[in-house]
Amino acid sequence: MSRADLLFPAEPTQRGIARELYALAKNQPIISPHGHIDPAILAEDTPFPDPAQLIICPDHYVTRMLLSQGVSPASLGVPTRTGEPYETDGRTIWRRFAEHWYLFRGTPSRLWLEETFANVFGVTTRLSPDTADEVYDAIAAKLAEPEFRPRALFERFNIEVLATTESPLDDLGRHAKLAADGWGGPGGRVVTTFRPDNVVDMEFDNWADNVARLGEITGDDTTTYHGYLAALRSRRQAFIAAGATSSDHGHLTARTVLLDEPDAAKLFEKGLRGEATEADAETFRGHMLVEFAKMSIEDGLVMQLHPGAVRNHNTWLYDTHGRDVGGDIPRATEYVYNLLPLLEKYGNDPRLRVVLYTLDEDTFTRELAPLAGGYASLFLGAPWWFLDSPEVLRRYREAVTETAGFYNTAGFVDDTRAFCSIPVRHDVSRRIDAGFLARLVAEHRLPLDEAAETIVDLAYRLPKRIFKL
């Protein structure tokens, strides 16, 4: 089987159909509605640093795997917040990575990296300790060329729209620069996403200070609950002006709570005084999800909910290196009862659009597909983070299609911090969908012409429509 048949079914009939379907999706423009690329990369359009700084240091998929085998993140160039030294020499980092390349056998990280090496940089030499310098030098040489600057790669990757993710405290200056250059703003090629966790979650570091800062930015009195809500609405409007079409909420659970305004105000004030318990924080998060659903009905932002991650489970890693460096762990998540208050209040309102994700694969069939198949406001987000592997992407289609169909799903999200992995991750999704649809065609469950229309919808039309891009 050739590399061109990557991830296609081994059965010859299905493989032939998959090739035909994939050819229709392969060159569709990329819609990337959720991710964590730093907008400064494209706003400043400066050459990328060395291969290690581009590929290894920011990729917590890579650094957490090596940490599991005793290789410290500091030795891989991950900055510390404790003042402890960390490695800054790119070649040293790359060699250390290559020495442990065997750890990635069978993982999606290896697949993404090998495809990035080959398809982005044209490097097909197999990585090993013996070839580390050869691969490093080949990639470094490419990075020195104008064709490998960020905006040039954006064009080459055929990205139509890329959404980044910022907090309400961000001044959106990078997005202003992009807009001034004709890249950002409403309808732009790079848009922002409203991510308010750091001013909503009372357990977030410096939550009360963040709330105060929110008020300073908007001019609202955020010592009061009324002023707090006004400030959030104000920042949502600023994000919409910067091109945002969605908000994103990364809560621990999917719990939603209906509170009367006086009760919500008391809880908010308790949090500001530093007296809120863990249960209080959970209740306030759940109440704010309902408030954000109301705001979404008012201003049109699509609401994304990403529950189920126990943040900073590895406290040593968090204390040494901070957030988002590989210390988070998935947990079981319940949706049927947790979402019920929000859905009873707003779930049948045609103006609301909620894209729902999970890190709990068991819920695909039991909870998420029936919910999406039962409420006009709900769509299923793609498997993400710990689930964005070829195996789970296949199981996802198998689990949800019979109940939710294809058109209650929202297309693929790459959820990446690694810019050069964007086309690779979308390509993997398109290949998996081609294989799944090929099986339906081979089993006479779907005509070929309908499968052909469906794969283009999944790759391009659905995410563009559902995320209002």
Image (cartoon, rainbow, N blue to C red):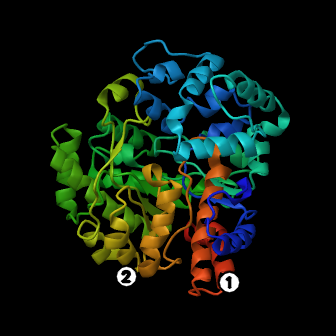
Q: Label 1 sits on what residue type?
A: Leu
Left/right of residue 382 with respect to residue 136 in the rendered view: left
- Element type at mark 2: loop
Label 1: few (<14), some (14–19) or many (≥20) C-alpha neighbours in 10 Å: some
Q: Is residue 255 above or below residue 385?
A: below
Residue at the location (71% across, 31% down)? 48
- Element type at mark 1: helix
Where residue 367 sits, quadrant-wise, is bottom left
Front in this rendered view, residue 119 or 200: 119
Residue 448 marker: 1
Left/right of residue 124 with respect to residue 37 in the rendered view: right
Front in this rendered view, residue 233 or 397: 397
Name the image quarter holding the N terminus.
bottom right
Tell me where residue 129 appears, x and y as whole percent.
Answer: 62, 23
Q: What residue sits right under mark 2 in the picture?
A: 374
Q: Label 2 sits on what residue type?
A: Gly
Tell me where residue 138 appears, x and y as whole percent.
Answer: 78, 29
Counting residues from the start of the chain, the first of labels 1 and 2 encountered is 2
**Do labels 1 and 2 touch, CB within 8 Å?**
no
Name the image quarter holding the C terminus.
bottom right
Tell me where residue 366 appears, x and y as whole percent.
Answer: 31, 72
Left/right of residue 70 with respect to residue 434 in the rendered view: left
Residue 176 visible from this viewpoint: no
Tell me where residue 180 appears, x and y as whole percent.
Answer: 73, 46
Label 2: few (<14), some (14–19) or many (≥20) C-alpha neighbours in 10 Å: some
